[in-house]
Image (cartoon, coloured by chain):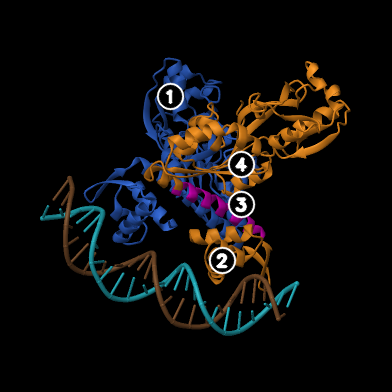
Chain colours: A blue, B orange, C brown, D cyan
Amino acid sequence: MKLQQLRYIVEVARRGMNVSEAAEALYTSQPGVSKQIKLLEDELGVTIFERSGKRFTGVTEPGRAIIASAERILLEAENLKRLGRDFSGGDTGTLTVAATHTQARYALPPAVKEFVAQHPGVQLILHQGTPAQIADWVEKGDADIGIATEALDNHPGLVTLPVRQWSHCIIAPAGHPILQQSPVSLHELARWPLITYDAAFTGRSGINRAFERQGLAPQVVLTALDADVIKTYVILGLGLGIISALAFDPERDAGLEARSAEHLFESNTTRLALRRGVFLRRYEYDFITRFAPHLDRRAVERVLQGGGEAYQL
Amino acid sequence: MKLQQLRYIVEVARRGMNVSEAAEALYTSQPGVSKQIKLLEDELGVTIFERSGKRFTGVTEPGRAIIASAERILLEAENLKRLGRDFSGGDTGTLTVAATHTQARYALPPAVKEFVAQHPGVQLILHQGTPAQIADWVEKGDADIGIATEALDNHPGLVTLPVRQWSHCIIAPAGHPILQQSPVSLHELARWPLITYDAAFTGRSGINRAFERQGLAPQVVLTALDADVIKTYVILGLGLGIISALAFDPERDAGLEARSAEHLFESNTTRLALRRGVFLRRYEYDFITRFAPHLDRRAVERVLQGGGEAYQL
DNA sequence: CGTGATTACGTTTATCGTAATTATA
DNA sequence: TATAATTACGATAAACGTAATCACG
């Protein structure tokens, strides 16, 4: 049994039983993969993949258990290599952070700025994506750290930690009548055309729920993936904007005014996602702590071990 | 990085940094081990073993982390192989049970008898030892299942499950005056010479505590490792015996009479120990359930995952 | 000096890639 | 017939064992 063989079966299973594709992804030849899989099956005395003739069609029942075990081994092997790099390579390496637009644009910059100044040898890679993409990336190991507000649950391969809570705000062009009202009510808000986030994003589901509870059906005239787009159209007078309070800055956003919507919509918790069981390098802990000061190394380690899932902000 | 290399470093560390010994234990040559360790160190960029010249003198700080990680990988790799055997090999293999005398002699026979009848292809190996030995064997993987009453705690590599509770009894030669008393009191008992288990065995510590609490210092004239020896000397009139109630059988033990000591000494819990995170084959689960019917596959699996440590009998 | 680790070297085995073959959809 | 897996085979490289060398106590 070789680690290589385990990589092969895991990759083949991941790629929908396509040996050729897996071989390419692993930078090796397809016959080699084929042969090693057969050798492993012979050694274990178990057929891992169902075949119809020469095509792989699925995973057998023992195969599922074997692949799950192989994934655990490979994850731990990956940890071991990182461990080596952490001790030897000094403060060099890469850190891949996956985040939504809101986080990347408004929440991360201070932490990133400090981090790159402090760790000049570490290449920081920032990937922007949807919460679902972010979860996938972290789960597959393509990203080290994921940051998003929604949809990080229901991924058994992830552990998540609360970063901070935030609420929405309403933005309007200066002089808009709704700015007279204080506080703004949900009924008043529903009378105007609205511009807000796309479903599946940045607390949008909480916005929907608030209107539904009151039996209101506001007219959402435009949905966007990020607050910058929303602001643009609010300035154009297309409607009122509902965005994350993090995304509004009175100085930069001249021509717009904001009112808190804290009392209207449930508050949201930004969460940080890590692959369960992963080993983190020193600078990764450092990044996390810069971004969320209450998440020191001990707090993160406790959750990674699976010990204290129920961490409270 | 190869699995073999991980085996080498783990074995060398286990054998007190003796490469020659480790090589012999792994049925390979010493230069091979030496070379592979160096290759691994080069690949990881980390020295794992401290050396003074050519001698290995200890494990470096990164080495400790690496060896711990390697042990996790090897355990999981072992699980994977067992998994293969479990699916392919049908109902064949070996099952090594480590138990104390009391368990092996009085508690295990029914389960063993059923098990060997049901699984003719499985070679059952029974190792008798002290509780500390048993814990070591299970932790090192030399035994699959450990059964003892004491000293299975404080082994972080083990998980334990309660099997059953039992109490002690007092045995005396037929006609002995203490048999008139009912129930027997601790003060009365302390007036006679006593014969019981060696320290570190079968609930002996509970016996000591009971006397100490009352400020009594009974005269223990003989300590033995098992109830059979104790019985022999009780018959010879050397003193009263305090043994596990499991070990007394009125029919077989003619010439002796027993009185319950349930009210005198704290009750003991026989526990079953498994290596943390291990994969168990079907017949291993079957053995456990035959020995302790309340421990079905699900209950054992839950504890093995580390999920529900606090299992209550 | 004896024990124990490294170096040197030849043998063997395993791995990998290319090319040819076979089976499936 | 095109796609995809297996078989065959040759080149390369890795692992292993023996023998010789070197270092510590």
Query: Which type of secondary structure does the marked residue at label 2 adopt?
Result: helix
Please, what secondary structure does the residue beneath circle 3 have?
A: helix
Q: Quadrant of residue A222?
A: top left
Task: Please tell me if label 3 and label 1 are on a single chain.
Answer: yes
Chain to which the residue tagged by mark 4 belongs: B
Q: Residue under circle 3?
A: A114
In the rendered structure, does residue B64 fall within the stretch colored magenta? yes
Quarter of the image with the N terminus of chain A is: bottom left
- Disc 2 versus disc 3: nearer the observer: 2
Pick the residue in front: A212 or A173.
A212
The residue that label 2 is drawn on is: B37
Find numbered disc 1 in the image and state the secondary structure of the residue it sits on.
helix
Residue on which the image places disc 1: A208
Magenta stretch, residue numbers: B60-81
Viewer-side label of 1, 4: 4
Give the x, y percent position of residue B191. Answer: 87, 26
* Relative side of B18 to A66, left or right: right
Q: Which residue is mark 4?
A: B158
